[in-house]
Amino acid sequence: MPINRLHMAATAAVATTVLFGYLSWLALNGAFENPEPTLFQRLETLWACLYWSVPACIVGILAPRQAIRTAASAKFFAALIAVAWAYPSFTPKGALPEQPMTLFWMALETVAGIPCAVLLAWLVAAPSTKPGLRKTALALMILPIAACMAWTPSPNAAHMALLAQWSPERAAAQAAKDIQTGSIKIYLHGSFTAHEVGVERSQASLIAGLPREDAGVGCVIPYMDVFEAQKDYATRYNKAIVAYLSGKK
């Protein structure tokens, strides 16, 4: 195989991974907790699919004999570029403190992304004489994704109890009670990067010594309405505590 074809495959794979990865991230960021996402944001699943499929197809077609090595290298360098490009948008504006998410995402891409990219490129490059092996590998990848996309939790007693527990209307009263009893705290909220919602960077010194508690932390979100209620509750509570501490100074 001419060397220029290998270089072409690697360059195109890196470019398309960066492009569709960044488009996917922009769409995901814009649509997250947005009641009226744009068409571009609603197509986040499409950008994500192109992010995984297009580079692998390019490598599998242009460099079938070097598919595994080329796919792994292209994925690693493209992920490095894409993550560095998107950072610091991983950390929400006003977050305290700014968190080093670049290393986290690079580790995730290394552990999960590179093997998937290699497998996809191999599936494209695999000879047609092995249709059974190709179908098995495709099924192993598609079935878990389809199951995750099809699963949606239904409302139940636990769901309703969580909504009642995190009712935003209770935040001010709870803050006043905690101030009275001397048990004030600050709530953290967020998916990829948890932070002190409702607190400005200039107010960081006021809350530096306060304990932190979870008000919806983590990227696994069983109930989006509960997650949004937690954010509203935490924002109102934190603002009430900051206002109290500002008055004491």
Image (cartoon, rainbow, N blue to C red):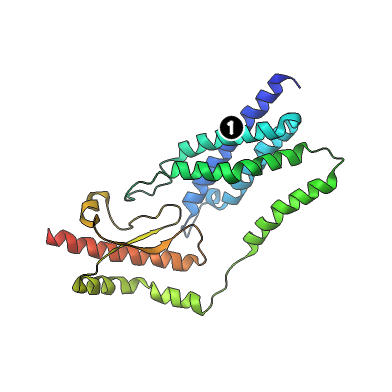
Q: Quadrant of the C terminus?
A: bottom left
Q: Position of residue 36 (x, y in %)?
A: 48, 58
Q: Position of residue 38 (x, y in %)?
A: 51, 52
Residue type for callout 1 = Ala
Front-lying residue, 198 or 72? 72
Residue at 46% across / 40% down in the picture?
86
Residue 3, compared with residue 54, is above or below; it is: above
Q: Is residue 68 left or right of residue 34?
A: right
Q: Residues within 10 Å of mark 1 (few under 14, many from 20)?
A: some
* Residue, far left: 249
Q: Quadrant of the N terminus?
A: top right
Residue 168, compared with residue 140, is above or below; it is: below
Residue at 54% across / 48% down in the picture?
40
Q: Secondary structure at mark 1?
A: helix
Front-lying residue, 66 or 244? 66
Q: Position of residue 49 (x, y in %)?
A: 63, 47
Residue at 25% across / 60% down in the picture?
210
Res 102 → quadrant: top left
Res 78 → quadrant: top right
* Residue, far right: 129
Disc 1 target residue: 15
Q: Position of residue 23 (x, y in %)?
A: 54, 42
Q: Is residue 84 left or right of residue 153?
A: left
